Amino acid sequence: MRRTATRRHYLMVRPTYFDVEYSINPWMDPKKPTFTEVAVAQWEWLRNLYLELGHRVEQLQPRSGLPDMVFAANGATVVNGQALVARFRHTHRCPESAAYLRWFREHGYRNVRQARWINEGEGDYLLAGPRLLAGSGFRTNTEAHLESQEFFGMPVVGLTLVDPRYYHLDTALTVLDHDTVMYYPKAFSASSRRLLEELYPDAITASDDDAAAFGLNAVSDGRHVVLPQAATGLVGQLRERGFEPIGADLSELLKAGGSVKCCTLELRAGQTEGPRHGR
Ligand code: ARG
């Protein structure tokens, strides 16, 4: 089966001030040294890859004192030109919201506001065809799910995360195309697992090792799937299903508990774009 890529539009934040200064997830150890220039080089590689794949990439200016700002996925959720800006759980990241609010207002988005409830953007909201899959358990509140459903006017399917290593939905599940996902079952509560099995009987499921390699923190354009290269099992499973996996080394950013998807916020203007041939 041949998969079709569609051209995407992403927002990214250069890790100019990247560091691990505090710990708000189990991956972060402020005692471990970090190398900002390595983070920047790895991030530049990812940005160039998106451009090579034919995607458009916008940049929001990083701010000093906000070392997690590189994780653009957390800044907002954008569907049909409507942007619901994050309200972060931890005070360390709260000032990031203002930068996103300003950016969307300056770039002509028609409906922009900050979420009332704690909501970490595309870290916990993944658009899957006609519905938004929404995580809770560690960051985003379940009240935020209802708020998002009202804001976007589309059904929100709540999923409960139970393993602190997989604290955002985008660390436990990847949307590969409208109706295909891959996920790590053990990251979810028993009832959320049943829900996922019912919605996606043909899903790819990740092994313990692939999940721990952050393999589900991946970005798909419908054909190319950019994922941490250490997730070798998923690379094989994706190939078998006709996807084109592309391994990324974002080891420096992993020290903060982030990888490919965390660095990538998808901008969905609402216009329909025709299918495009991959490389
Ligand atoms: N250190 C950041 C935090 O804990 C990492 C965020 C990763 N982003 C993501 N979309 N999963 O908030």
Image: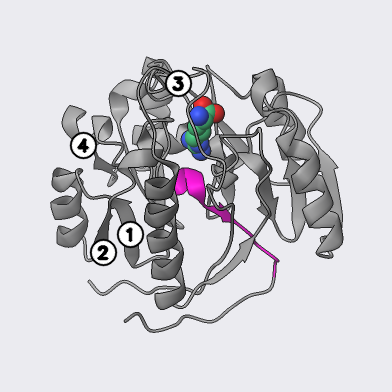
Q: Earlier in the sequence, mark 3 or mark 4?
A: 3
Q: Nearer the viewer, residue 253 or 182?
A: 253
Q: Nearer the viewer, mark 3 or mark 1?
A: 1
Secondary structure of the residue carrying numbered label 3 = loop
Q: Circle 3 sits on which residue?
A: 161
Q: Nearer the viewer, residue 262 or 33?
A: 33
The image position of residue 110, as x and y in percent, is 86, 60
Dot 3 amino acid type: Leu
Q: Circle 4 sits on which residue?
A: 210
Q: Circle 2 sits on which residue?
A: 243
Inspect the magenta stretch and tell me whether residue 35 lies in it: no
Q: Circle 1 sits on which residue?
A: 225
Residues at marks 3 and 4, CA–CA distance in whole angstroms? 17 Å
Q: Are marks 2 and 1 in contact (CB under 8 Å)?
A: yes
Specify start and end residues of the magenta stretch as a single range: 260-270
Q: What residue lies at 39% left-to-right and 68% top-to-bottom?
A: 49
Whether the residue carrying mark 4 lies under 8 Å from ligand 1 is answered with no
Q: Nearer the viewer, mark 2 or mark 4?
A: 4
Residues at marks 1 and 4, CA–CA distance in whole angstroms? 15 Å
The image position of residue 157, as x and y in percent, is 56, 34
